[in-house]
Image (spheres, rainbow, N blue to C red):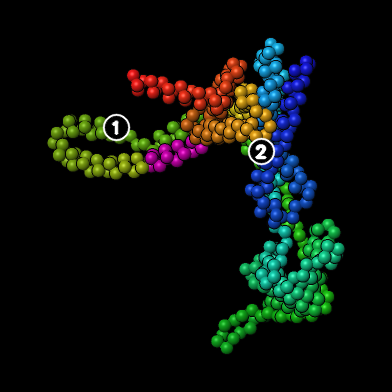
């Protein structure tokens, strides 16, 4: 490796890893802000939270790689141009393309890595990350008793506390509760009424070491229970009512143990999420696309054959009627009257059948459109395995060329230009995906729209950079404006 290659690569790797880390951090912050309510209200341990962040950090790498390559290559050649190192290289007979060669090789390897990552790691990370996120979203919120409000998230219980005193950090007995009212519902639920009520002056709430059970230690209270028996009592008006017995038990120290099985995260079978296209690699996507396309074709042929049952053919009966009119002239008048009645019935029958076939056709067109959209979604994801890898190379062409043109390094102007081009890439990708999923354009055109637009732009900028274009110099446009004004004044005088 020559010194020029070491110089270029040494200037590239620092901004590359820094930008990659910053972009991953920004996407993770976006995830946290979007699901902040789900995370705060659930009692997540650090291991679960760390696994979730790890999976989604992996998912952001394919999106972060193009921006990292764009910004780092732009800063590398911007710094070389700002300190006149590119000028020194060109004066020594070394062309710009030769100076870009080591980064060209690096960009090729990063593109290959991006394809492998999208095809092998991303489906696994999608499956693990989104299944874990679903389990967190569906988990119940942590137990949080509020003063003066009934808490009903514990199955079979409704609990109200008049006053709550938080326990200290070193306390093992839990929060101090005053004025407790606990309703215990029967197995049939709260709708069947309150069969048992516990009133206590004070108490403490804590969980066991394994966080499996919630314990209420109650002091100075009463337990009121209602039992129904088989006896029947009769009122003065003759109405009957089933007998009931009431029982009251006083206590000074009573422990109520409640299972916390319904709380916490319950892992869902990950096979329930494997149907999504994001959870598939290229081989699986290709097989599913072919299967869905065959299913769509077979369904289309089945719909065409089934639609025949909605038609009734009257051609044979009309022909026999006309022959009878010609052969037996004396029956023409009566047959004409019968034909008028038959024609009215036939018109009503035709109208009903037309409405039926319209409803049948509309529902089947919607059904077939949904099947076709499924084919487009899986086919689009297959193309994205390649497009995200190629976009890394396209961003390198744009970044290296722009850096050589603007001759500015650091995190000022290069960051602004990189963000503009990345947003342009993102918008084109989203628009192409939408057009492809809606069937407005051919799926390969929609999938490759961003690269098809930006790749010629990268080649144009490369050509301008090789010829030392002053594309972003303010003096160039001021001189051109002055020349245009002078020509206008000369023409007006003439």
Q: How many angstroms separate mark 2 from mark 1 (CA)? A: 54 Å
Question: Which badge, 2 or 1, comes first in the chain's sequence?
Answer: 2
Return the residue at label 1.
315
Query: Which image quarter holds the N terminus?
Result: top right
Question: In this orientation, does residue 232 appear?
Answer: yes
Up-down relation of residue 384 to residue 239 (above or below): above
Helix, strand or loop at disc 2?
A: loop
Q: Residue at x 65, y 68 (%)?
A: 190
Helix, strand or loop at disc 1?
A: helix
Q: Residue furthest front?
A: 493
Which quadrant holds residue 150? bottom right
Q: Residue at x 75, y 80 (%)?
A: 248
For the residue pair 443 and 345, the one nearer the viewer reads as 443
Dot 2: within a 10 Å radius of its alpha carbon, few (fewer than 14), some, or many (20 or more) residues? some
Q: Residue at x 47, y 24 (%)?
A: 482
Chain part drawn in magenta: 356-371
**Residue 64 lies in the magenta stretch:** no
For the residue pair 11 and 224, the one nearer the viewer reads as 11
Dot 1: within a 10 Å radius of its alpha carbon, few (fewer than 14), some, or many (20 or more) residues? few
**Residue 363 lies in the magenta stretch:** yes
For the residue pair 388 and 123, the one nearer the viewer reads as 388
């Amino acid at each position: 490796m020559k010194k020029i290659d070491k110089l270029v690569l040494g200037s590239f790797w620092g901004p590359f890893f820094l930008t990659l880390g910053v972009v991953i951090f920004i996407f993770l912050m976006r995830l946290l802000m979007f699901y902040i309510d789900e995370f705060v209200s659930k009692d997540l341990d650090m291991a679960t939270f760390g696994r979730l962040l790890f999976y989604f950090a992996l998912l952001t790498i394919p999106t972060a790689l193009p921006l990292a390559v764009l910004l780092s290559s732009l800063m590398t050649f911007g710094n070389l141009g700002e300190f006149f190192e590119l000028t020194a290289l060109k004066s020594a007979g070394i062309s710009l393309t030769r100076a870009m060669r080591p980064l060209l090789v690096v960009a090729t390897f990063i593109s290959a890595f991006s394809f492998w990552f999208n095809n092998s790691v991303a489906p696994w990370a999608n499956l693990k990350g989104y299944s874990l996120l679903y389990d967190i979203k569906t988990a119940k919120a942590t137990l949080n008793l509020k003063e003066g409000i009934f808490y009903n998230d514990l199955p079979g219980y409704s609990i109200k506390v008049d006053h709550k005193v938080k326990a200290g950090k070193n306390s093992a007995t839990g929060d101090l509760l005053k004025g407790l009212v606990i309703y215990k519902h029967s197995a049939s639920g709260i709708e069947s009424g309150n069969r048992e009520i516990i009133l206590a002056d004070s108490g403490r709430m804590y969980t066991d070491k394994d966080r499996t059970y919630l314990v209420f230690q109650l002091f100075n209270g009463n337990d009121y229970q209602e039992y129904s028996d088989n006896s029947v009592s009769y009122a003065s008006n003759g109405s009957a009512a089933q007998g009931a017995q009431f029982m009251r038990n006083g206590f000074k120290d009573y422990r109520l143990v409640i299972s916390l099985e319904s709380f916490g995260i319950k892992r869902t079978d990950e096979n329930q999420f494997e149907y999504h296209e994001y959870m598939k690699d290229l081989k699986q996507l290709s097989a599913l696309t072919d299967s869905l396309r065959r299913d769509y074709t077979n369904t289309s042929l089945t719909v065409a054959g089934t639609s025949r049952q909605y038609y009734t053919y009257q051609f044979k009966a009309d022909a026999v009627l006309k022959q009878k009119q010609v052969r037996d002239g004396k029956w023409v008048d009566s047959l004409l009257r019968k034909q008028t009645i038959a024609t009215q019935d036939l018109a009503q029958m035709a109208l009903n059948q037309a409405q039926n076939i319209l409803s049948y056709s509309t529902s089947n067109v919607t059904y077939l459109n949904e099947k076709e959209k499924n084919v487009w979604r899986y086919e689009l994801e297959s193309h994205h395995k390649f497009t995200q890898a190629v976009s890394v190379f396209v961003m390198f062409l744009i970044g290296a060329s722009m850096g050589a043109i603007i001759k500015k390094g650091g995190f000022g102007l290069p960051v602004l230009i990189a963000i503009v081009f990345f947003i342009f890439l993102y918008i084109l990708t989203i628009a192409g995906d939408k057009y492809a999923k809606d069937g407005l354009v051919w799926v390969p055109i929609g999938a490759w729209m961003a690269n098809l637009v930006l790749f010629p732009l990268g080649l144009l900028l490369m050509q301008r950079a090789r010829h030392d274009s002053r594309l972003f110099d303010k003096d160039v446009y001021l001189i051109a404006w002055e020349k245009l004004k002078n020509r206008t004044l000369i023409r007006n005088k003439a």
